[in-house]
Amino acid sequence: MGLFLAGALGWGCQSADYGVQAKAPLDCKATYVACGCGCCGGVEPEVQCLSCANKDDLQALIQKDQAAQKDPQCAVMGCSTGTKYVYCDANPQ
């Protein structure tokens, strides 16, 4: 009977969204240079346009780049020119 009463009072219950993080609002002024294993010095990165209107996810690209930096193959890969991600519809050039 005690467990039934605890359940009825809401003890131990969790909302359906428990542990789910709210997605941060899109910062269309943000830019990021992805280098994978590392950017070569003195070389301008290639610009890759993202669309704020289409809600392109810069955070997903950042996470992918940071995961690539942890790859053990980076020790033998060398540097890359890098890619600069820019929301072109929010940052006219």
Image: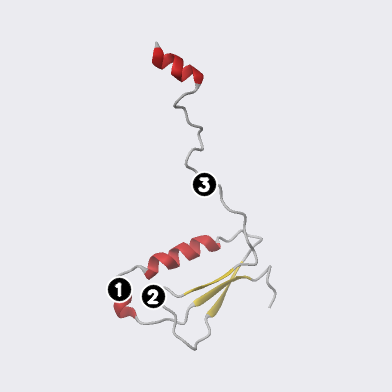
- Mark 2, Cα crowd under 10 Å, few <14 / some 14-19 / many 20+, is many
Residue found at x 53% / y 80%: 46
Q: Which residue is mark 1?
A: 73
| Residue 72, horizontal then vertical, whole percent | 29, 70
- Mark 1, Cα crowd under 10 Å, few <14 / some 14-19 / many 20+, is few
* Foreground pick, 83 / 69: 69
Q: Earlier in the sequence, mark 2 or mark 3?
A: 3
Q: Is residue 8 left or right of residue 88?
A: left
Q: Is residue 49 above or below residue 13?
A: below
Disc 2 to disc 1: CB gap under 8 Å: yes
| Residue 81, horizontal then vertical, whole percent | 46, 82
Residue found at x 68% / y 72%: 91
| Residue 35, horizontal then vertical, whole percent | 45, 75
Q: Which residue is mark 2?
A: 37
Residue found at x 46% / y 86%: 41
**What is the distance, in whole Å, between disc 1 and disc 3 at their CAs?**
32 Å
Q: What element does badge 3 sit on?
A: loop
Q: Earlier in the sequence, mark 1 or mark 3?
A: 3
The amino acid marked with disc number 2 is: Cys
Residue found at x 62% / y 54%: 25
